[in-house]
Amino acid sequence: MSKVNEIFTLMCSHCGRRYDLNSKIWRCQCGKPIDVILNAKAIEFKELKDIRTWDFTMWRYVKLLPIASPDNIITLGEGWTPIIIKRLYGVEIIFKLDYLNPTGSFKDRGASCLISHLVEIGIDSIVEDSSGNAGAAIAAYSSVAGIKCKVFVPASAPEGKKLQIRSYGAELVEVPGNRAKVSEEALKESKRTYYASHMWNPFFIEGIKTISYECVEQLKGYVPDVVLVPVGSGGLLLGIYKGFKELMELGLINSVPRMIAIQAQGFTPIYDYMYGNYGGSPPNIVLADGIAIPSPPRLEQLVKVIRETKGDVIIVNNDEIIKAFKELAKLGFFVEPTSATVLAALWKGLESKLIEKGESVFLPLTGIGLKAIDKLTKISDRIFRN
Ligand SMILES: [Zn+2]
């Protein structure tokens, strides 16, 4: 038996039922999401730099990723993205430039791990639903792996993202209506094909956790005080949390940062769950389309992590996003509006004292601005108005 099965197990986040790592399931029999659990005691791992120091991708941490055979790894060079530190607004900001990943977003980490796993368990055809970035990432890695891929997106998704998905050779299905309707259509299709959902599949989160490994390694063991994360389906927040948590369990760091979720006006399920209805309807043009998710399947898990780390949730609106987008661009970071929410949320967090002066704040920059050119062009008069 491969050692990977001693180190990792699949476990339900709700009822605790366990599954073999190679089970072809994407959720528990009870209907709730499953997680990959790392058994820190089963692994000999003393220093992050111990592993594949010659590998400048997220796969340098291959020992901590649930893939049995390196031959199955599907990589496009994702991960090991730069960190840029700036002292601004009285805090130390650690920007992680994840928009520099191969398809232009952090989702490549998740897609690389998930598709490698699917190669390992012999899947040759998949279906996914996405607001754009996850679809593009899954389409790219599927193409490299020779896996047939069908992606359902909202008809309102940015044209650039839709074109990108089709360019990788995936079949694109545009669904009119809201994001929930898109998932519904993909779920119907999943009765015939494997559902490679970035929202449900725990192997996607496994790839994303490498952001935290890299953060700690690049900062030479330092752990930021706070992490601000745009949350749609929540894979980014859960992945970043999991990365820090595992490093703590392995005895490499002593704390996990406070995890603060960012949501956009009109899409506030975390706030609603924690504090009651926030109210406010979605704006006419949803700038933060990457986090326009009304009911994420991992909502309970997200709230648990936020509470456990003494984090919180911050809601931002279009005006705040545009201001942050402009400020980030002035700093040289051309990111998509969803990604710009991190700076808008930092300003609000400082104002409400949720974040204190002098703290260190980790801001992942998640998606490149080029993906949202059509949307940004539509609002250019608002961007360039003084
Ligand atoms: Zn269960």
Image: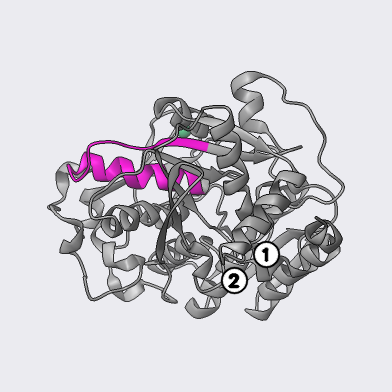
Q: How many other residues sit within 10 Å of disc 2, few (<14), some (14-19) or many (≥20)?
A: many
Q: Helix, strand, or loop for circle 1?
A: strand
* Residue that carries the numbered disc 2 in the rendered image: 139
> CB under 8 Å between callouts 1 and 2?
yes
Image location of residue 355, percent across then percent down: 48, 33
Which numbered disc flags the more N-terminal residue, 1 or 2? 2
Residue type, mark 2 in image: Ala
Q: How many other residues sit within 10 Å of disc 1, few (<14), some (14-19) or many (≥20)?
A: many
- Distance of label 1 from label 2 (alpha carbons): 8 Å
Q: Helix, strand, or loop for circle 2?
A: helix
Q: Which quadrant holds the C terminus?
A: bottom right
Image location of residue 283, percent across then percent down: 83, 43
Q: Residue at x 58, y 65 (%)?
A: 126
Can residue 27 be seen?
A: yes
Specify start and end residues of the magenta stretch as a single range.
236-260
Residue 11, placed above or below residue 61: above
Res 19 quadrant in image:
top left
Specify the label residue 383 is tagged with.
none
Q: Return the residue nearer the eye: 103 or 28.
A: 103
Q: Residue at x 45, y 51 (%)?
A: 205
Residue 256 on the magenta segment: yes
Can residue 193 be seen?
A: no
Res 335 quadrant in image:
bottom right
Q: Please, which residue is most extreme toward the top here?
A: 276
Res 160 quadrant in image:
bottom right
Residue 254, placed above or below residue 46: above
Specify the label residue 151 is tagged with.
1
Image location of residue 137, percent across then percent down: 56, 67
Residue type, mark 1 in image: Val
Residue 288, placed above or below residue 149: above
Image location of residue 284, percent across then percent down: 87, 47
